[in-house]
Image (cartoon, rainbow, N blue to C red):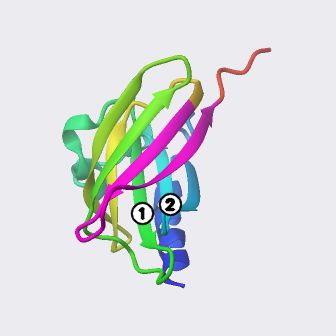
Amino acid sequence: MNARRGLAAICAVLLGAASPAASAQPAHAQRQASGLLFHYGLVPSEMVLSHPQSHAERRMHPADARKDRSHLALAIFDAASGEPIARAEVMVHITRAGGASTTKALEPMDIAAKPSFGAFVPVGAPGVHEIRFEVRRPGVAGAESAEFEHRIAGPKRL
């Protein structure tokens, strides 16, 4: 299925961005909702910032590349056909339990020659983060959405 091959390629690229020296770890999840397959990954920005300036991931969203953020990448596929969704307006809403809420537009980008969407987002503080994606596609009435829960453990206590 195209969606599975696309997911495998995207996860390989996202997880391949990890440097053994980095203390934070990348994360990814998938879910089917609203007739779409949502596959997202979060890579701590220090992993992306460790790449040379000429690297594609450094050039994707240069203004937002800060150490207090994570790079979020989202690949979306039609659940029935497995075809990737390339034309859409995508928003992400992130709420940290007991904390701030952020809404951000995701920019179109390619990962492993597959269409996807991404941005740097303020996810990195320990706690539970609710991540909700909203997708608006030409010719489709209303928004299609999916929600995820992302947990980040605090420092280990001795």
Count all numbered tags in the image, as a single digit: 2
Dot 1: element? strand
Mainly helix, strand or loop, the magenta region? strand
Name the one closer to the observer, 37 or 127: 37
Residue 127 lies in the magenta-colored region: no
Q: Residue at x 25, y 36 (%)?
A: 64
Q: Is residue 89 above or below residue 80?
A: above
The residue labelled by disc 2 is 39
Amino acid type shown at disc 2 = His
Q: Which mark is residue 75?
A: 1
Magenta region: which residues?
A: 129-152
Quadrant position of the N terminus in the picture: bottom right
Residue at image point 35% right, 56% down: 135
What is the residue that sits farthest to the left in this orientation? 63
Which part of the image, by quadrant, shows the C terminus?
A: top right
Position in image of residue 86 (x %, y %): 29, 70
Q: Is residue 113 or residue 20 the one in the foreground? A: 113
Q: Position of residue 91 (x, y in %)?
A: 32, 47
**Label 2: which secondary element:** strand
Q: Amino acid at mark 1?
A: Ala
Query: As rendered, which of 41 and 149 lies closer to the eye?
Result: 149
Q: Name the mark on residue 11.
A: none
Mark 1 to mark 2 CA distance (whole Å): 5 Å
